[in-house]
Image (cartoon, rainbow, N blue to C red):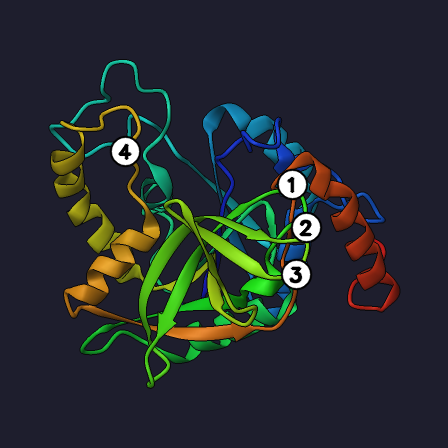
Amino acid sequence: MDKPVLVVLAAGMGSRYGGMKQLDPVGPGGQIIIDYSIYDARRAGFEKVIFIIRKENEADFRQVIGDRLSHLMEVEYAFQSLEDLPAPYAVPEGRTKPFGTGQAVLSARELIHGPFAVINADDYYGPEAFRVIYDYLSTHADGDKYQYCMVGYQVKNTVTENGSVSRGVCEVGPDGMLTSVTERTKIVQAPDGVIRYADGDAWVDLPGDTLVSMGCWGLTASFMQEAQARFSAFLAGNLPTNPLKCEYFLPTIVSDLIADGKAQVKMLHSHDKWYGVTYREDKPGVVAALARLTEEGVYPKTF
């Protein structure tokens, strides 16, 4: 079995935050958020990382991330391109945004031949996520069904004080397998500490220990084949009605594979607290948290 590799989705520019938030220092030694993920991934066993970026950002990423981290892990790049579509499809006139996380992962299809983990560049996941996902990918191979996994977080560990967040609320069967992920686009923690999500005009309480997805997936090479094969059907069904904004999402592909009986997804757990810079006002809290983790010895000051 090939050793698992790490795939980092880093093509976004962080529209709500402004600027390339992936390159903004937050650690006491000048680290950016992705530095912590690479550090945690390497000590979990990952030896290779593939950054999925836009071609126009390559110079910045090589200088700020790739060249500096190449002593820790082997670094490769894949480029998400709006024009990377299956024949006979072409980019609709007026569209400027790529086609989502499914297309992003597909941009690395020539570089991935075995199991891989997928994370976002602008989320701090903590050490536990990388340990459990590497262990799973190293010990499970596709059989009658594709053997995927996902790391779930308790929603209370993923909210911000500075606005709403979007999270995939997970349902898990008695066998520990993921049965569904429902996207909730407006989750907030009220001043009374209760977490709620908007459902139309109503607000629904969400228990703090509810598992949510933070985009930390473990997949096999079969995902690339399936995502490529299903891309044309997605475009055929969505371009006529939503040509400028439709997106081919990784979680939707996985959900469809579960529904088709072709894949099962083991729900793994992390008890670490998520940190991210969803809004500019989040940064001071992230800086303080990483300084505290450094003082506690979870991370060295420089790495």
Circle 2 SS class: helix
Q: Which residue is mark 2?
A: 35
| Residue at image coords 66%, 61% | 193
Closest to the observer, 295 or 81: 295
Image position, residue 24 (x, y; %): 71, 36
Question: Do the numbered discs 1 and 4 sit on residues whose CB atoms are within 8 Å?
Answer: no
Q: Earlier in the sequence, mark 3 or mark 1?
A: 1
**Quarter of the rendering occupied by the C terminus:** bottom right
Q: Which residue is mark 4?
A: 246
Q: Which residue is mark 3?
A: 193
- Residue 3 in view of the camera: no
- Residue furthest toward the bottom? 174
Image position, residue 186 (x, y; %): 48, 46
Q: Earlier in the sequence, mark 2 or mark 1?
A: 2
Q: Which residue is mark 1?
A: 65
Image position, residue 140 (x, y; %): 36, 78
Residue type for callout 3 = Gly
Residue type for callout 4 = Cys
Question: Do the numbered discs 2 and 1 sit on residues whose CB atoms are within 8 Å?
Answer: yes
| Residue at image coords 13%, 27% | 240
Circle 4 SS class: loop
Cα–Cα span, label 3 and label 1: 37 Å
Q: Earlier in the sequence, mark 2 or mark 4?
A: 2
